[in-house]
Image (cartoon, helix red, strand yellow):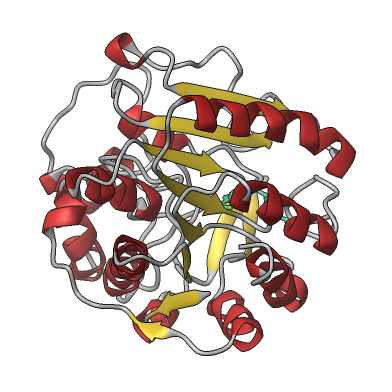
């Protein structure tokens, strides 16, 4: 399978994330991409599609913020990675403030996603990597894999979080629709709910979002991904959330997968974007499902059996030593 990649993604390397009341080593490391690279073989270089496909999904002010945030952080006399500490939740006003700490709060929702001097470039090329995989599918490939990092599915139209800055899957889905490749559906099989993707298309009747993930009653991102979230306004019925309990193994995963695939088929999907996280793996250090390596091949075989052209976008997966083999198991050529 064609794998797209750009080495500029590797330069994004935050040091720490805020978790459970303290700073812990950042989980979303460049080594993740390196181990996938060594397992999947040769890659195609990402092509530059410019800002337009990004601006179709993200607010202009947010894109501006991402590009200047670390510079503004340094100009304020700070060192290291930029991160917020005040978030304007609980019905605060949408003020247009200049202080970096106010803006970090305005454009993020967690304390786990620092911005470095290289974050914008890495996120930009992550999105371009995803768009280049779409090119391959638009040109007739059955499936293509975008080796993206930073990942994207937690990023909303105007916010970062969950190690994500630009929503690569949403950018690909919107661009595919623009090119007339729809109906487009997004299936998110990362361990964590893809809150950013859901938010971006919540009111959109013309984009199906289906997610299988850990129950947000117990797991990040908590405030999105509950089963009763089915879309908003005109988009009601085009969001399907299938939360599963901690400890879910392949036997427990399959009924949710059956429901997801039935919804995608019933939608008349002609292009599928897969937000693929390998953090459903039993050995993942920050997650609590129990899929085994062979289950990724089984999962891929079920998706491939839909017989819909598919752009596979890399999301999470933090068992770094085993990540490459797990991704390779999912991409197994015989399945696709
Ligand atoms: C793309 C993606 O998978 N993002 C996940 C973001 C999760 N961030 C919060 C994780 C909290 C668990 N941290 C456990 C640290 C154990 N040392
Ligand atoms: Zn995840």
Between 229 and 309, the residue placed more toward the observer is 309
Whether 248 is drawn above or below 127: the answer is: above
Residue 158 in the image, given as x and y percentages of width and height: 26, 41
Q: Note whether residue 190 is visible.
A: no
Observer able to see residue 313: yes
Q: Quadrant of the C terminus?
A: bottom right
Total tally of numbered discs in the picture: 0
- Which residue is depicted at the point 34% across and 69% down? 136
140 vs 54, left or right, is right
Q: Residue at x 18, y 26 (%)?
A: 94
Q: Position of residue 296 (x, y in %)?
A: 74, 58
Q: Is residue 186 left or right of residue 54?
A: right
Give percent across and percent down for residue 240: 53, 23
Can you tell which quarter of the image residue 245 is in? Answer: top right
| Residue at x 18% of width, y 55% of height | 53
272 to 126, vertically: above or below = above
Q: Quadrant of residue 191?
A: top right
Which residue shows up at 45% across the image and 40% down it?
186
Q: Does residue 284 appear left or right of residue 43 in this picture?
A: right
Q: Nearer the viewer, residue 11 or 256?
A: 256
Q: Position of residue 147 (x, y in %)?
A: 48, 71
Q: Quadrant of residue 24?
A: bottom right
Q: Considering only vertical position in the picture, is 221 above or below 307?
A: above
Figure check: 291 above or below 33? above
């Amino acid at each position: 399978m064609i794998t797209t990649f750009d080495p500029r993604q590797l330069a994004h390397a935050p040091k720490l994330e805020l978790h459970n009341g303290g700073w812990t080593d950042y989980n979303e490391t460049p080594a993740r991409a390196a181990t996938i690279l060594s397992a999947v073989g040769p890659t195609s270089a990402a092509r530059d599609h410019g800002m337009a496909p990004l601006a179709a999904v993200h607010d202009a002010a947010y894109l501006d913020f991402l590009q200047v945030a670390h510079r503004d952080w340094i100009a304020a006399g700070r060192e290291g990675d930029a991160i917020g500490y005040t978030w304007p939740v609980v019905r605060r006003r949408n003020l247009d403030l200049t202080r970096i700490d106010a803006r970090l709060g305005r454009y993020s929702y967690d304390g786990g996603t620092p911005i470095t001097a290289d974050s914008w470039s890495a996120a930009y090329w992550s999105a371009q990597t995803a768009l280049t995989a779409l090119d391959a599918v638009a040109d007739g490939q059955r499936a293509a894999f975008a080796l993206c990092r930073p990942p994207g599915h937690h990023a909303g139209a105007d916010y970062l979080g969950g190690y994500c800055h630009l929503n690569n899957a949403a950018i690909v889905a919107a661009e595919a629709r623009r090119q007339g490749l729809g109906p487009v559906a997004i299936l998110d099989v990362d361990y964590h709910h893809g809150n950013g993707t859901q938010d971006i298309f919540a009111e959109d009747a013309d984009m199906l979002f289906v997610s299988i993930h850990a129950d947000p009653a117990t797991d990040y991102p908590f405030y999105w991904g509950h089963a009763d979230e089915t879309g908003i306004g005109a988009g009601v019925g085009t969001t399907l959330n299938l939360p599963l309990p901690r400890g879910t193994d392949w036997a427990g995963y399959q009924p949710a997968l059956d429901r997801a695939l039935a919804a995608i088929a019933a939608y008349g999907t002609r292009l599928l974007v897969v937000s693929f996280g390998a953090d459903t793996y039993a050995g993942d250090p920050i997650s609590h499902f129990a899929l085994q390596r062979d289950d990724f091949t089984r999962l891929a075989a079920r998706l491939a059996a839909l017989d819909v052209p598919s752009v596979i976008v890399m999301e999470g997966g933090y068992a770094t030593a085993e990540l490459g083999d797990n991704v390779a198991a999912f991409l197994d050529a015989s399945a696709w």
